[in-house]
Amino acid sequence: MAKKTEPVMGNDASTVRDVAARAGVSASTVSRVLGGTYPVAASTRARVLKAMRELDYVVNAHARALGGSTNKTVAFVVDDVTGPFYAHIARGVEEQASAEGRLCMLCTTHGDPQRVLAVVETMREQRADAVIVVGGAWEDKAYQDRMTHFAHALDRVGSRLVLVGRPPLGPGVPATVVEYDNEGGAFAMTTHLLTSGHQRIAYLGRVPGLSTSDQRLSGFRRAHELLGLAPDPKLILDGTFSRSHGYQGARQLLASGAEFTAVFAGTDMVAAGALQALREARVSVPDDVSVVGYDDVPLALDLFPALTTVNVPHEELGRAAVRLALHREELPGSQHLVLGTHIVLRDSTRRPGH
Amino acid sequence: MAKKTEPVMGNDASTVRDVAARAGVSASTVSRVLGGTYPVAASTRARVLKAMRELDYVVNAHARALGGSTNKTVAFVVDDVTGPFYAHIARGVEEQASAEGRLCMLCTTHGDPQRVLAVVETMREQRADAVIVVGGAWEDKAYQDRMTHFAHALDRVGSRLVLVGRPPLGPGVPATVVEYDNEGGAFAMTTHLLTSGHQRIAYLGRVPGLSTSDQRLSGFRRAHELLGLAPDPKLILDGTFSRSHGYQGARQLLASGAEFTAVFAGTDMVAAGALQALREARVSVPDDVSVVGYDDVPLALDLFPALTTVNVPHEELGRAAVRLALHREELPGSQHLVLGTHIVLRDSTRRPGH
DNA sequence: GCGTCTATAGCAACCGGTCTCTACGGTAGG
DNA sequence: CCTACCGTAGAGACCGGTTGCTATAGACGC
């Protein structure tokens, strides 16, 4: 029978003390070899490294995080990794985080504001260096208040709330904001359509209360106003940022008999659905109707016809989010960034009647 | 001047002891209120909860993980979140993990076998409950050996290596494997093409040494053999699982003047590139050439024409990976799962010459 | 030859919860 | 009236690494 705490044969991970015992030194010495920032005699270091190798030792990240205050982790909160829009931002976040020696925690919320709040709370428990929340915000007052609360709570423990692609919470709230020019992109695209001769443009995929959608529609409206036009309310359809809404919405639009020569889809996914509906109805794009999207996800290239859309610098959004949050000490005053957008002309648009 | 450790005004997070002091109880009591699995008088519990609320207390996940041996985390190692193939598996993993009360760490490797190894090592440090590695494996012997080593190392500390969409490491290696019938899907698809009358099928996107690719090609070959045919080596092009390879490969094929009536693309992304090249060359799909893909990512629906492809149960792969790994005690013997695949006929295929 | 300085290693406290064991007040049973 | 027991709360060790302070040995100066 085993005496006292005789290990069951290599079960359980080895600790610094195990390594220390084997190398004939103290735990502190092992820790110093690990850290590297302390003089350790070459011969001692060699013995310690040998012992580590023999025991197949790896540090316990939690114990380390408990001592020091940072745990070298960045949290990433997103609606749904499946959407290419989010996926590309995620890639930027992951790349930058890994370049800065941070790990990346991923959480999805499936568009549920309640889950956003719950997830951010969990990230507080994890003591992440930064908590990056991506995607449109809800204008709900209670929701905004909770987020503001989290911003302060995270700030208090040396962490940072980062909002990507959503508006700031207000002055004095300690949060980093990385936006892109949502309104400007929609304005540019709408202006392009209007000046090409399209007078009646349908807007597909308005999501009331979602900041991203509100801003896009706002650019759409401003472009009309500037040219002395007013969009027809009947051509603006409420829905979601999904392919299926694009499909249903376009069908509904066609069935209603409303006149339009162009469709402005809230996102590229919505455009994809709309294109399918138009194809099924034998409406030719761009001969009969022009279609534009928003986001410029890779899919846009593969749609038929290749989609004219608004480019959003996805990966740079992700990278900037991590960079600004982690280096907020060195670059103060730059905690609100707005990246530019631009339209990309492809094959889904044409002057009407040509 | 502040006396001794006078806090700088709410700086630093509050601890169980802070809560205990405010509630006039001991730290243990606070911990028990937190845990819930121990009798605490209702009045005491109320006082503690009140104190927590007032101090805006949240537990420190690291301290908790240090005591107990599990940290309630699942690690997810993937080539590139951007690919829809991975994104959907990621969604399955995330959903199941969150359903099982686990957080999800995301790491990307950009197809670099070295980074896979480095990342798995980091996950060992994090003491994740399971480490899920997704995507084809490299047949490199040293690589396999390292993975086997990790499997044992993780097993020793109660964690689990999970391989998704890659072959087992060998008998006796403590790892969970969730595969899908890669070879069978390719066999079924190739058989479908051959029996429809396609005799000369080009294979685009062979990646030598990558298990996924090898298996698909193997199904492709077996289908030929069964019908007494032999694929023409000149029609099998080496490359990568990327859209750009599909584009370049198809162009090269057309330029070579080789005869073929169908293209079997290694993945849907490869098919997307091939379709573009064919369209540019005014080769009609499916009238002149049929094209099929593999994976059935959502993109397949939006390609033109809608792509005939092999369906892979992405999300279920992810969910099963988490489920099997976390419940391996309860369901022993089921640590190797092979999910089925099936072909999905859409508009990119037709009998030749019709 | 003695004192001091420097290089290196050890001791022990600490990070923040959790958990086991012990203690204590009160009630019920003998 | 005393003891046994139940319900509840506290003390303190522990998880595994880090780190400030201390200790010791050898080197060097005088």
Image (cartoon, coloured by chain):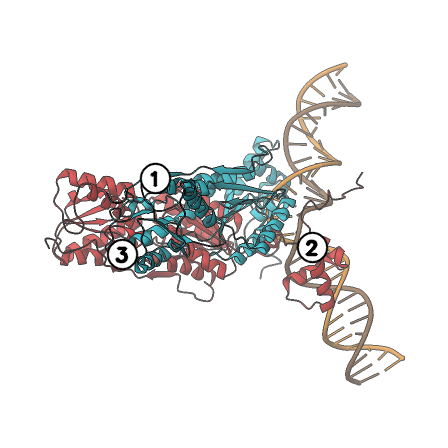
Chain colours: A cyan, B red, C brown, D orange
Secondary element under disc 3, as helix, strand or loop, is: strand
Which chain does the residue under circle 3 lie in?
A: B
Instruction: Sort mark 1 into few (<14), some (14-19) or many (20+) by Cα contacts within 10 Å.
Output: few
Q: Report the disc number at residue A195.
A: 1
Check the image and report above or below for C22 versus A235.
below
- Numbered mark located on residue B199 in the image: none
**Pointer 3 residue:** B310
Which quadrant is the N terminus of chain A positioned in?
A: bottom right
Q: Say what amino acid the circle numbered 3 marks.
A: Val
| Nearest to viewer (mark 3 / mark 1) | 1
User: Residue A186 or A46: which is nearer the viewer?
Assistant: A186
Question: Foreground mark, 2 or 1?
Answer: 1
In whole angstroms, how far apart are the C-alphas of marks 2 and 3? 54 Å
Residue A305 coordinates in the image, percent (x, y):
27, 46
Q: Would you name the residue on which mark 2 appears?
A: B16
Q: Badges 2 and 1: C-beta atoms under 8 Å apart? A: no
Residue B92, percent across and down? 42, 57
Residue A317 image offset from top left, x and y in percent: 46, 40
Marks 3 and 1 sit apart, C-alpha to C-alpha, by: 44 Å
Residue at horizontal 75 percent and vertical 56 percent from the top: B22
